[in-house]
Image: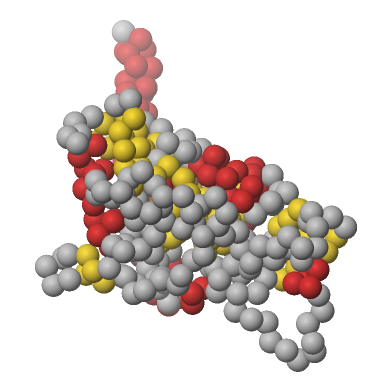
Amino acid sequence: MELGGDAVPCGKDKFISRNELLLHLKTYNIYYEGQNLQLRHREEEGELIVEGLLNISWGLRRPIRLQMQDDNQRIRPPPSSSSWHSGCNLGAHGSVLKPSTLPDIPLADGDSAPGTENPGNGAAPRPAEEAPQLMRTRSDVGVRPRGSARTPGEIRGILLGSTSVFTPAYGSVTNVRINSTMTTPQVLKLLLNKFKIENSAEEFALYMVHTSGEKQKLRGSDFPLLARILQGPCEQVSKVFLMEKDQVEEVTYDVAQYIKFEMPILRSFIQKLEEEEDREVMKLKHKYSILRLMIEQRLEEISEGPTAM
């Protein structure tokens, strides 16, 4: 199917050409070749739509509230940070090498039906979406024997009537099946509904977090799946995090460059900036002192003019 070079919206007042997006998508799928994180695309009424699984890392500092319907309904806890792929390899000529094997993710209910399109043009089974991964039984939040260690994927929780309170392990990963037309608020609501989280979506935000320390908040008009594609597939470079709005500040690229420097180096930067500031202040003072003298001389000439006559 030949796709034109029409612009595809990827946020407020942000566009990318269709051909460029397809190039990014091709690189993305080569990286995840043979994995369920590959994405499919189709054209619907002239609009290019990409769909598939998006990995989202838990980055919450406060507990979240989960609905408790009965003692038998359960959702497994999120995997530990060591159970998901973080490799990033490039070939000798810049080609993308597929990552090391990812853990098998069981099919969730309703996700076993075959898809209608794969990254190529042939039919292939629909990738498995990770089943909701938060325990919801009393035994899962019971008292741990004294001296026993918490397992890597375990999450802390207590029961409050029909609500359980949990803190997902920081950095553990879940995923949701979305498409490129879904905005940030829609993805947030989908994720919260998946885990039956009672907290309001307004409490959270999605952030693109880079290993450099840069943190970019995805705006309400952004499309998280497109943002992930444009950033590239390697999660060792950047990840999508779910975080509390009031607990995280954005970090620009310029600021992120200085985050990992030692304190003596940062102090030397500050000293240099202060010296430069002092020089600029002296220049301004000198400039305006000259202007002041010129104005005063002119005022004297004007005041002496009528007297001389």
Residue 106 percent coordinates (x, y): 51, 65
In the rendered image, the quadrant that contains the N terminus is top left
Residue 238 percent coordinates (x, y): 39, 61
Q: Residue furthest left?
A: 93
Residue 192 percent coordinates (x, y): 63, 49
Closer to the camera in the image, 240 or 27: 27
The answer to whether residue 174 of the structure is visible from this angle is yes
Q: Is residue 116 above or below residue 77?
A: above
Relative to residue 172, is residue 255 drawn left or right?
Answer: left
Q: Residue furthest right?
A: 161
| Marker count (numbered) | 0
Relative to residue 140, is residue 294 drawn left or right?
Answer: left
Residue appearing at x 46%, y 58% in the figure: 128
Relative to residue 48, is residue 248 drawn left or right?
Answer: right
Closer to the camera in the image, 98 or 110: 110
Q: How is the image coloured?
A: secondary structure
Residue appearing at x 34%, y 74% in the figure: 100
Residue 18 percent coordinates (x, y): 24, 37
The answer to whether residue 226 of the structure is visible from this angle is no
In the rendered image, the quadrant that contains the C terminus is top left
Residue appearing at x 77%, y 63% in the figure: 72
Residue appearing at x 55%, y 57% in the figure: 108
Q: Residue furthest bottom?
A: 147
Q: Is residue 41 above or below residue 92?
A: above
Closer to the camera in the image, 189 or 210: 189
